[in-house]
Amino acid sequence: MSKSLLGFKYLTFDVVGTLIDFEAGIKNCLGGIGAEAGVSVDGEEALALYRAARYTDHADLFPDDLVRVYSIIAPKLGLPTGVEYGERLRDSAARWAGFPDSKDAMARLAKRYKLIAMTNARRWAFTHFSTELGDPFYASFTADDTKTEKPDPAFFHHVFDFVGREGGSKDDILHVAQSQYHDIGISRQLGMTNCWIQRRHAQKGYGGTIEPAQFTEPDFHFHSMAELADAVDAATA
């Protein structure tokens, strides 16, 4: 590890899955629809079906794509079909909660670093996510801004260009994320220092996130945002 946690000016963040608990949001919404229909929904099965339906060549931007995804997974889960249910799943994103440690950790980290959001979600959804997190971000990049999604290197280059205009470089950035597929692997390929927040450390599999072709050993590894903030506080003391 070439740098300490105090050697960065910027922290860039994946948002959905790292700071916002989208898996719980999806499971809660589907469970609510199921309860109304008298159907029991297995959360992990629902996430596996979501993952298979979400990552296709026909996908729309997130979370708008949840309307299409619902139409695919609902029959397999025994849930009622109809566009209104898909829209309900999509619209539930506005109420998804952050992980219990996210808001406090981000407030602590914002005292030392410039925090930049990098999310595959659309701007409308990110606005709700940022509010849920206490609006901690110095800058933000969404799929609407970049016209692409991670792990496309082009997404990251938008951020590099932004930091460059401030006189910095990617060496000044620590990229923080839970997704090996969308963030950790590509950030390594692009020469960034990264920090893996292993949110599913106590669970098997990758849940709602696509499994990477190969695992990338991160530069820093924590199980939560609280652990990262604690490590920064300890290094500062």
Image (spheres, helix red, strand yellow):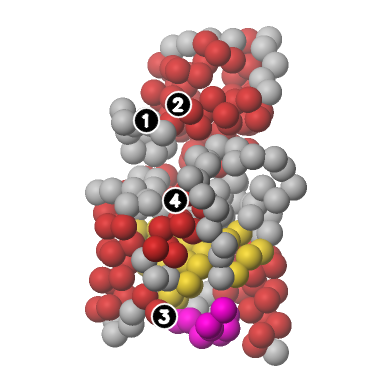
Tell me which residue sits at (66%, 85%) in the image.
235
Local crowd size for mark 2, using a 10 Å CA cut-off: few (<14), some (14–19), many (≥20): some
| Closer to the eye: label 3 or 1 | 1
Q: Is residue 98 above or below residue 48?
A: below
The residues tagged by marks 3 and 1 sit, at their Cα atoms, a distance apart of: 34 Å
Tell me which residue sits at (39%, 71%) in the image.
191
Q: Is residue 97 above or below residue 157?
A: above
Magenta residues (range): 1-9
Q: Nearer the viewer, residue 126 or 9?
A: 9
Q: What secondary structure is found at the residue carrying circle 2?
A: helix
Amino acid type of the residue tagged 4 in the rendering: His
The residues tagged by marks 2 and 1 sit, at their Cα atoms, a distance apart of: 7 Å
Tell me which residue sits at (70%, 51%) in the image.
201
Could you tell me residue 58's position as x and y percent?
31, 28
Residue on which disc 3 sits: 172
Q: Judge from the rendering whether residue 177 lies leftward or rightward of residue 166; answer left or right.
A: right
Q: Indicate the quadrant containing the C terminus: top left, top right, bottom left or bottom right.
A: bottom right
Q: What secondary structure is found at the residue carrying circle 3?
A: helix
Residue on which disc 1 sits: 56
Query: Do the CB atoms of the residues marked 2 and 1 lie less than 8 Å apart?
Result: yes
Q: What secondary structure is found at the residue carrying circle 4?
A: helix
Amino acid type of the residue tagged 1 in the rendering: Thr
Q: Judge from the rendering whether residue 126 lies leftward or rightward of residue 209; answer left or right.
A: left
Residue on which disc 4 sits: 182
Q: Is residue 50 above or below residue 193?
A: above
**Dot 4 or dot 2, earlier in sequence:** 2
The residues tagged by marks 4 and 2 sit, at their Cα atoms, a distance apart of: 17 Å
Residue on which disc 2 sits: 53
